[in-house]
Image: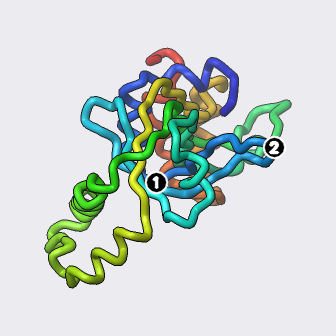
Amino acid sequence: MHPNPAFRGTAEDKNLAFAKERGFGMLAISATDAAPMVSHVPFLISEDGKTADLHLVRSNPMARAAKNATLARLAVSGPDSYVSPDWYNADDQVPTWNYVAVHLTGQLSPLPQNDLPDLLDRLSAHFEANLLPKPPWTRAKMTGDSFDRMLRMIVPFRLTIDDVQGTWKLGQNKPNDVRHAAADQMAAYGFGSEARELAALMQSPFADPETE
């Protein structure tokens, strides 16, 4: 996360809305005498933004390490792209990388195994809603034996969110015309992830310092 305050002023509700819409991130916990554990997980944030529900494969070492409540961080990445100094049409610029990211930090705790079917139903309903008008998939399309076998392989968890931090590095520290020039070039030539979406954010009023 970039420490520059120019990129860190986004309101908590906007950061949570971004994380909720993405619905996928990297869950990290510290491991004793070893590198931090990281798992890539889908998740579902509660309506009040206080918790994020998720599941881990039972054989995942993180699932065993988190059998008791443990401090964890869920890192949610958005669009990102390299920025060439030539794109600014201004002197004395340097290469950089613009991006959007939100970190949710709190206590990760296992949920009762009986909560797992409801969690899976809520997760699938949330993501299937993005595919309308396709009829939503539900576990009614599975045989009971197949679903029961799947349940035995995964473990439900809840992250109680104590801290929300977001970085929206969109060139807010540049004059608007300089940033917009870079965004135009990024939309045409940028590379990374969702470069055009990032360029649109750079050109939006949200990135104008005077509107913050």
Nearest the viewer among 11 and 192 is: 11
Residue 143 is left or right of residue 96, and the answer is: left
Query: Is mark 2 in CB contact (under 8 Å) with mark 1?
Result: no
Q: Amino acid at mark 2?
A: Asp
Would you say 87 lies left or right of 112 here?
right
Where in the figure is residue 162, as x and y percent of width and height?
47, 24
Q: Earlier in the sequence, mark 2 or mark 1?
A: 1
Where residue 133 appears, as percent x and y from the top left, is 15, 69
- Circle on res. 33: 2
In-front residue for pair 161/166: 161
Q: How many marks?
A: 2
2 or 1: mark nearer the eye = 2
Which one is nearer the viewer's eye here, 147 or 51? Answer: 147
- Residue type indicated by callout 1: Phe
Q: CA distance from mark 2 to mark 1?
A: 28 Å
Q: Which colour style is shown?
A: rainbow
Q: Is residue 126 among the parts visible in the rendering?
A: yes
Q: Name the residue that disc number 1 marks.
A: 24
- Mark 1 element type: strand
Query: Is residue 98 depicted above or below 107 in this figure?
Result: below
- Examine the rendered structure and indicate whether residue 143 appears above or below residue 6: below
